[in-house]
Amino acid sequence: MKMKRILSLVLLLAGLEYASAQVAQDPPPPPPPPPVQMDTTHVSPVEQKDTSDPVYNIVEVMPEFPGGLDSLFKFISHHIRYPRQARRKGIEGKVIIQFVITETGEVSEAKVVNSVGYGCDEEALRVINMLPKWTPGKQRGKAVKVRFNLPIRFKLG
């Protein structure tokens, strides 16, 4: 029994020495790259991004359209016009518009992220850009910018 313990201990120590020898043979990791320093003296103001005002996707208090979601859907359905070209060609589909509600509740940065074409994209953008002011979203009690994706379905009949 004593011989088994000694043999186990010897094997264990031999294994540890082998493992540490393997680790010692691995090449050291490469040194980190030097920090990049940019010369911003020639960058125009348009190229510089203001990172002090982030755009959130989810906040503690989400922006709200006046009257709620039902009123938003009524507003869109009341103002949207099926594009003539899409109607003639029998085009149906879903345009997804991405936009930002600013700290003051205004709609900004509206763009198409899922296109249908045949005038549907432009019509969806036109209506989104007509939206009245929203109640702005809040994070930690402060009004912030919040990004939305809104699908607008074009369906004939």
Image (cartoon, rainbow, N blue to C red):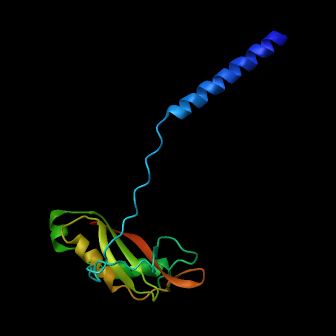
Q: Is residue 95 above or below residue 7?
A: below
Question: Can you say which quadrant of the picture contains the C terminus?
Answer: bottom left
Circle count = 0
Residue 1 x/y as whole percent = 84, 10
Q: Answer yes or no: is residue 10 visible.
A: yes
> What residue sits 74% from the left and 14% below the top?
7
Q: Is residue 154 visible?
A: no
Is residue 49 rendered to the left or right of residue 65?
left
Nearest the viewer among 37 and 90 is: 37
Give the residue displayed 36% in from the left and 79% down from the top: 76
Q: Based on the displayed image, in which of its 4 quarters is residue 133 positioned?
A: bottom left
Quarter of image, res 132: bottom left
- Going by the picture, which residue comes out furthest to the right? 2
Quarter of the image where one finds residue 154: bottom left
Residue 82, given in percent of the width and then of the height, sits at 24, 74
Nearer to the camera, 130 or 18:
18
Q: Is residue 10 above or below residue 132?
A: above
Does residue 128 appear left or right of residue 31 in this picture?
left
Residue shown at the point (33%, 78%) measured from the top left:
48
Q: Would you say 74 lies left or right of 16 here?
A: left
Picture residue at 37% right of the left edge, 65% below the top: 36
Q: Nearer the viewer, residue 86 or 18?
A: 18
Residue 155's x, y, as percent? 29, 66
- 125 and 27: which one is in front? 27
